[in-house]
Amino acid sequence: MRATRLGAALAAALAATLTLSGCGGGEPAGTPEAARTQSQAPQGPVKLTYWTWAPNMDKVVEVWNKAHPDIQVTVSKQAGGDDAAAKFLTAAKAGNPPDLVQAEYQHLPSFVAAEAVADLKAETETVKGEFGEGVWGLVTLGTDGVYAVPQDSGPMMLFYRQDLFDEYGIEVPKTWDEYAEAARAVRKKDPKVYLGTFSSKDPGAFTGLAQQAGAQWWSISGEAWKVDIADAPTVKVADYWDGLVKEGAIDDTPYFTPEWNKALADGKLLTWPSAIWAPGTLESNAPKAEGKWAIAPMPQWNAGENHTGFWGGSSVAVAAKSPNRAAAARFATWLNTDPEAVGALVKEAAIYPAATKAQTALTEAPGYFANQPDFWQQAAQASAGARGFTFGPNVGVTYNAFRDGFDKALQDGSPFSGAVRAMHEATVADMRKSGFSLAS
Amino acid sequence: MTAVTTRRSTGLLPTAVLLAGAIYCLFPVSWVLIAATKSPGELFTTPTMAFGTGFLSNVSDLLAYRDGVFWLWLVNTFVYAGGGSLLATVVAAVSGYALAKYRFPGRALIFNLLIGGILVPAVVLAIPQYLLFSKVGMADTYWAVLLPQILSPYSIYLARVYATAAIPDSLLEAGRIDGAGEWTLMSRVALPLMVPGMVTIFLFQFVAIWNNFLLPFIMLGDDGKFPLTVGLYTLLAAGANQPALYNLILTGALLSIIPLIALFLTMQRYWRTDLSSGAVK
């Protein structure tokens, strides 16, 4: 979810070139011709292609290929993020998509709306129980269909520099109010150091924060979409960070930039409200701080609650036009529920599995967090309290509006809540233009 | 450079402007050079312009990354850039020569269409081209990247301008009187005269294809066919939950410009003959 202009350019070009069929969200994507199984008495092994950007996925797939000589999967490693979604949609529209594709949860609805992915309801009936309700909702979009098999999930937690917290004498904040106070305290102790930063380039992080507060940006009612991005919880989150940034209590360096990396490495940034996959990022950007970071539950809006949101996470979808749908579905369910496969995913691809059983099977904390033996227990706790929402069919537009709006708000000092309203308006306008029916 | 005898007064201002331009162009390159020497731990902690200690380990990490896929991308890039620019040069030279030296109905129309083609950025065409290639079942093949780059309106325009200036009509007339066929005229008389222009076109195309990102990004699904640009991008956009492999990307970027520099150095002398041949005319 790094900020890329390319994603915007591709999306715009796509919108110009292709006319997405404007269907309501409730319609299943499986078209009659896709439902036809062509793999009766196949000649030689079935060959499947799989677009993913998870590292070392080829090693995991090798396990499958050895055990299933009749279904051979080829991994094609793609660039991840928003560009990957645009590329898959283009390929699907042009009629030559890969059989399997890694689909981030927020992009899955756009795949469904474009009828690019198949409904796997029948094929996934047996594995439904392996996943928690929250994550399953992300692949059903609250409909009767099942459009992908969940792979990994990104519940958010608070990552903080334990050693520096001790040095500055700060308690781990349990609520956002305490977080704000801690931020001010840090500035007083050392004006070069910030407790945290607000990134105007990472809509995914903001989405997670809004989910934690209870936002429901999209929902499906009957055949129509209900959009409410500027709802009360989201505005509350925006106002909160607006205040902190304006008074200078926290920084506004975007995540994943060289400046941010440097601040992390130099110990000038003490916390990062991030998702479970953060250790990998921290390890590569601040290798010297190994053993100095710790995790805590996200600060809460009301003391005593246990809510958090999701940042990232993805699923494996089968292309509607794949001629080998049944085989592809078999592979997708194996990959994300078979203990051996999920174990390999955790080890090789360093993901946090979406399957519940696999989550509890994790025992050894990541090397970077060797100082925190209860890392995975904490993660499971966060996971249990995580709440997401149904993503809409044009998240790309919303996310671009986030970047534009918040960039502008940071530059000219206009309120963040205005940026949130701009996100809402851009999203609604785009959905109208694409022909989605909206409930008001 | 050879004009020592004529000693013109060299203005300070032009020199300063050129110097500023040179620094502006070279600074990012030197930054890549320096950053590529830094190990992941040093990248964001040491001063920007201080050399690191990790260059060799970066290179070996990069070459070992996914069983040496970097080499594959490098070979692919050579196929796309080398093959594409060779074919593009041939097409441009022949059509430029024809447009410059033959009068035939529709000549102006073709030329105007080409001029119009220069105004359309290749980026805009990438998605329509992808849809077309998908229709004929050629998406995700080497040809999908090669074919669109073979016809380069700008190169044809350059070739035409060059042919007009470099091939005297009288020379062709003399050839015809001596009984040379049109094919012989082109291959023996015209094209040899156009070599400096063709080198320029070749270089232009080579660099353009070498740096091209969007077309292969859209056309190719199989990462075994990726060129360096798209391949390195997969390292950069490794997904939100994966760290970008900055040190490998920087090293890869550095290694990928070396062939371009080598190409320019070896091709330079053709440009020199170009300039001098213009000078004596």
Image: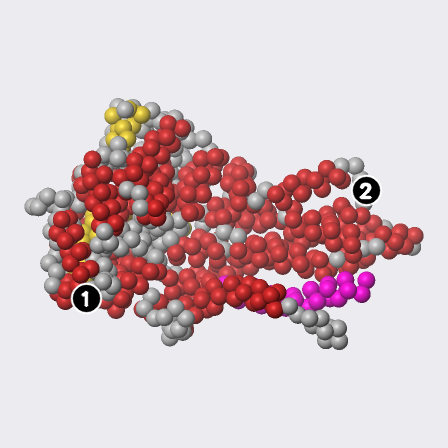
Chain letter, disc 1 residue? A
User: Residue placed at 66% from the left, 70% from the top?
Assistant: B10
Screen quadrant of the C terminus of chain B: bottom right
**CA neighbours of label 1 inside 10 A, class few (<14), some (14 to 19), many (20+):** some
- Which residue sits at x=71%, y=58%? B197
Q: Quadrant of residue A434?
A: top left
Amino acid on which disc 1 is placed: Gly
According to the picture, the residue beneath numbered tag 1 turns out to be A291
Residue identifier under label 2: B103
Q: Residue at x 29, y 50 (%)?
A: A199
Is B173 or A45 nearer to us in this picture? B173
In the image, residue A35 above or below residue A86: above
| Residues beneath discs 1 and 2 located on the same chain | no
- Spot occupied by residue A293 in the image (x, y as percentages of width and height): 19, 62
Is residue B256 rendered magenta in the image? yes
Query: Quick check: can you spot residue B215?
Result: yes
- Classify B242 as above or below B13: above
Residue B233 x, y percent position in the rendering = 42, 55
Q: What segment is highlighted magenta in the picture? A: B254-281
Distance of label 1 from label 2 (alpha carbons): 78 Å
Residue A124 is at least partly visible in this image: no
